[in-house]
Image (cartoon, helix red, strand yellow):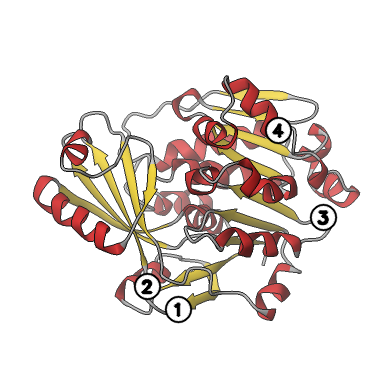
Amino acid sequence: MEILGSGALNLDLVYEVEDLSVTREAGFALSPGREVAGSHEEAGRLRAFLERAGRLVAKSGGGSAANTICALAALGHSCGFAGAVGDDEAGRFILDSMAGVDCSMVRKGGKSAVCVVVIGRKMRDRAMFVAPHEGETFFGGPALRAVIEKIDVLHLSSLVEKSGLVVHEGMAAMLSDGQLLSLDPGELYAGRGLKAILALIKAASILFITREEVAMLTNASTGDEGVAEVAGYLGQAARDGKTMAAYPVFAQCGGSLLCMKMGPEGAMVLCDRRRVFQSAVSVEKNIDNTGAGDAFNAGFLHGVLAGRQLDRCLAEAVGLAALSLSGYGRSWLDELGKQNRS
């Protein structure tokens, strides 16, 4: 196995409404581009409202790390996943959606996580409400350690439960020189503040993040100050000789990378030696931007693992993010698989 991912495994239910404001008027605290967590009861009430006020347009497997891992598998990488799904119909659907991914490290039991994605028809903006698996951190053990010892990359995204950070810190601590930690904290980890996730940031070879998440972490008065503060904790994790020899991008940049995802503005990478910008790829139609950042992660990691230089890694990332906008959920992966086979 080349890459192991870990994070939430969700059943994504995508609804379309005329405008996201209708959800706030109905008393649901949803905002464009934001993700919040709550109970399954709250998710049920939201779904009942959306059945009346909008329409269900897609049902898909979801979760940030899971989306990235599925895209990497479609690109031909050997991938696995560690997490938890329910012993229910939703859990079976989620696992069926992980085509080409080794899910032997996924625990089955309880009630599956649900992510209600709401897309505004006018602006094509979206908000997400996550009701987590009731035991999403109950995975691991000696078998997981044995897998981690043999992988090249560990890719982590957030778990909702407070114990999730402890579990992921433990997984990161199992890595040795030459192995990469790729981290996308998302809003759920970033919202806990810099001190809470500092151990993971310091261990990261690649940190994928947005401006909004930097602001959550640092409370800096300017965006540049916050980015500089977070970037200052990176560097050591990717400086060992094995990593530099195996992945040219780290030798080129002199250490770990902060990858700033900026949506339609493109992306930027900061490292010890460079600050590199990449424009976004224009698209004819934006169907669903849910998971575009996860696709970006997959494209960048694909470039790193292929031994490409930084500008090429960034081009792969923004290209894959643009492709992901072409369909709801993970439906765009069918096209990616066709391209990879041709």
Crowd band around label 4 with a 10 angstrom C-alpha radius: few (<14), some (14–19), many (20+):
many
User: Who's the residue at 30% across and 75% down the image?
Assistant: 89
Kindly report the distance in space between the C-alpha atoms of the residues bearing marks 2 and 3.
Answer: 34 Å
| Quadrant (top left, top right, bottom left, bottom right) of the N terminus | bottom right
N-terminal-most mark, 4 or 3: 3
- At mark 2, the secondary structure is helix
Q: Position of 141 compared to 190: left or right?
A: right
| Residue located beneath label 2 in the image | 91
Check if mark 4's residue and mark 2's residue have beta carbons within 8 Å.
no
N-terminal-most mark, 1 or 3: 1
User: Who's the residue at 42% across and 43% down the image?
Assistant: 324
Point out which mark residue 108 bears.
1
Check if mark 1's residue and mark 2's residue have beta carbons within 8 Å.
yes
Q: Nearer the viewer, residue 17 or 341?
A: 17
| Residue located beneath label 3 in the image | 178
N-terminal-most mark, 2 or 3: 2
> Which residue, as the protein is rendered here, is positioned at the far right?
241
The kind of residue on which mark 2 rests is Gly
The kind of residue on which mark 3 rests is Gly
Crowd band around label 2 with a 10 angstrom C-alpha radius: few (<14), some (14–19), many (20+):
many
Residue 303 can be seen, yes or no: no
| Residue located beneath label 4 in the image | 231
N-terminal-most mark, 4 or 1: 1
Crowd band around label 1 with a 10 angstrom C-alpha radius: few (<14), some (14–19), many (20+):
many
